[in-house]
Amino acid sequence: MPDLPGRASGSGSPEASEPPGGAEPRARDLFAFTRALPLDRAGELLAAIQQLSLARSLPEIQSVVRHAARHLTGADGATFVLRDGDDCLYADEDAIAPLWKGQRFSAQTCISGWVIHNRRPAVIADVYEDARIRHDVYRPTFVHGLAVVPIRQSDPVGAIGNYWASRHIASDQELQTLQALADSTAVALETVHTYQQLEDSRLDTLNRLALAAEFRDDGTHEHTRRVARTAFLLARELGMTPAEASLIRQAAPLHDLGKLALPDAILLKRARLTVPEYERVKQHPAAGAAVLSGSASQVMRMAEQIALTHHEWWDGSGYPAGLAGQEIPLGGRLVALADVFDALTHTRPYKRAWPVERALGELRRLAGTQFDPAVVEAFFELDPSALVELPRARARSARQRAQPRA
Ligand SMILES: [Fe+2]
Ligand SMILES: [Fe+2]
């Protein structure tokens, strides 16, 4: 792609004509600038800025930028490039023909890398009129003219590019429009990053609370990790994508967060629960879901769904809502089986651990009543006996077995 030999030698700007309006970043009066734009363009720019301010994830930002970057200037193509260490990742694009989406180029050699390094725009009227540009890299594309601006001028995190199929010198207005979009993109990326950090720390806190809840009736506190791993493997076995499955893996440990609301007298009771006590236990899915509710994060939303539905039964006789069949979200169905298998094969205050074969017989018996038959089927496709312990715990118990007794 935009390969620039000579850039690494520090011989100055190899490709850029000085951007209209000066090279140094300057404060921009967005209001005054948009007033100078044609009405429809000003409206489009303000709409894009508004969408960026509402974006809560990188894909949302990408989708706004790739569309707006091309349409605001009427270019034939636009790219959204992110700095990734020493590379430039061409993360997204919208163009009349494919450019470089998904490809990485050394920041030392590509135009986006030059823009990021120099913290200023680059404008090339026609790449084939510039001897410093490697023409063979552009030949597979439609590109002749281009303009690239940095995202966050003080310390660029990426670049936005515009491309034209014929000779084109980007005008002052086109470049300022693109830079206004890039400046808003920088703010949106910052917001998403901060938001992500907040979500991560909230998730971490809730995971610790879930661990605290679990610790009360499982001294090894490995139950939630085992359930998460089994649910993840089930998700993969059932054809979910790696991203969907890992969402389930992250969310599953929070399934019993609502146990925090149960008193020890009920949670640790060895004898059979009374009817009022069991009614109290049946409130823990809703209690957990309430704590997890109201988040925009995908993981938290999945965790809320799983917490609420992991005691629903396939035949509709579960709790709290009595959902049946496909009404029960898949995450809830997966964790339901993983949770019961783990509870059966481990010691709890009220029972001893069952042998694996007995637990497997129980799961088979409950296929179609408590569990989704397809999930039970998928479970038997895995190696269930390997799911009783986490890999490290298995190795530890094997080592203990191998040690001679004193
Ligand atoms: Fe539960
Ligand atoms: Fe559980």
Image: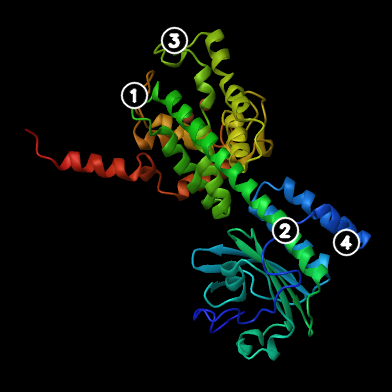
Earlier residue among tags 3 and 4: 4
Q: Which residue extends farthest left?
A: 406
Query: Disc 1 vs disc 2: which is toward the camera?
Result: 2
Q: Position of residue 363 (x, y in %)?
A: 48, 35
Q: Which mark is residue 352?
A: 1
From where the camera sits, is residue 1 visible? no
- Tell me the CA gap for discs 4 and 1: 70 Å
Query: Disc 4 vs disc 1: which is toward the camera?
Result: 4
Q: Position of residue 255 (x, y in %)?
A: 53, 31
Earlier residue among tags 3 and 2: 2
Query: Disc 3 vs disc 2: which is toward the camera?
Result: 2
Residue that mark 4 sits on: 41
Image height check: is 58 above or below 399? below
Residue that mark 3 sits on: 265
Q: Position of residue 109 (x, y in %)?
A: 54, 78
Q: Residue at x 57, y 38 (%)?
A: 198
Q: Residues within 10 Å of mark 3 (few under 14, many from 20)?
A: few
The part of the image, by quadrant, that contains residue 121 is bottom right
- Tell me the CA gap for discs 3 and 4: 66 Å
Residue that mark 2 sits on: 63
Earlier residue among tags 4 and 1: 4
Image height check: is 185 above or below 299? below
Q: How many marks?
A: 4
Q: Residue at x 79, y 49 (%)?
A: 50
> Relative to the observer, which residue lies in front, 271 or 118?
118
- Tell me the CA gap for discs 3 and 1: 19 Å
Q: Are marks 3 and 2 in contact (CB under 8 Å)?
A: no
Earlier residue among tags 2 and 4: 4
The part of the image, by quadrant, that contains residue 21 is bottom right
Earlier residue among tags 1 and 2: 2
